[in-house]
Image (spheres, rainbow, N blue to C red):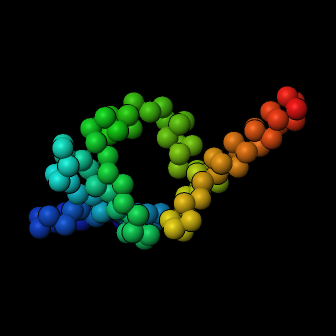
């Protein structure tokens, strides 16, 4: 568990018993963004200032729900891009069609 700081531009590593990510600053775009890489899967996400501020203002319950692997598909193969959301939406559409049709 811990944080490893690297001064060579490779980013810093933040890890615990559940995850290990590399965090670095990406200045290649129009504005600086935080580059976060899941070291287990290789999946990368870039977050700009607005997205980072949104995380700060997100209520704790919403953030906890995002980390729930049962509803977000966390920990799955990134090539499949699976998420629990489409199944829930499909169920809503099916119910709506049954009522209307």
Relative side of 28 to 65, left or right: left
Residue at 80%, 33% in the rendered image: 96
Q: Is residue 14 visible?
A: no
Q: Is residue 92 visible?
A: yes
| Residue 71 at x, y percent in the picture | 63, 50
User: Camera-side residue: 7 or 72?
Assistant: 72
Question: Which quadrant would residue 24 be assigned to in this image?
Answer: bottom left
Residue at 50%, 65% in the rendered image: 78
Residue at 17%, 53% in the rendered image: 28
Question: Which quadrant would residue 57 be assigned to in this image?
Answer: top left
Question: Which quadrant would residue 2 be assigned to in this image?
Answer: bottom left
Tell me: residue 27, above or below residue 49.
below
> Which residue in the rendered view is the most extreme toward the front?
101
Residue at 44%, 69% in the rendered image: 41
| Residue 55 at x, y percent in the picture | 39, 38
Tell me: residue 46, above or below residue 8.
above
Relative side of 89 to 63, left or right: right
| Residue 1 at x, y percent in the picture | 36, 65
Relative side of 21 to 12, left or right: right
Relative side of 61 to 88, left or right: left
- Which of the image's four quarters has the C terminus? top right
Tell me: residue 45, above or below residue 89.
below
| Residue 98 at x, y percent in the picture | 87, 35
Count of marks overlaid on the render? 0
């Amino acid at each position: 568990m811990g944080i490893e700081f690297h001064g060579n531009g490779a980013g810093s590593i933040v890890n615990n018993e559940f995850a290990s990510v590399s965090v670095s600053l990406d200045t290649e775009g129009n504005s600086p963004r935080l580059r976060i890489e899941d070291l287990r899967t290789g999946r990368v996400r870039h977050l700009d200032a607005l997205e980072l501020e949104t995380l700060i203002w997100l209520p704790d319950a919403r953030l906890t729900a995002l980390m729930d692997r049962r509803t977000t598909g966390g920990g799955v193969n990134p090539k499949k891009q699976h998420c629990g959301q489409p199944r829930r939406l499909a169920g809503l559409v099916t119910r709506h069609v049954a009522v209307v049709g």
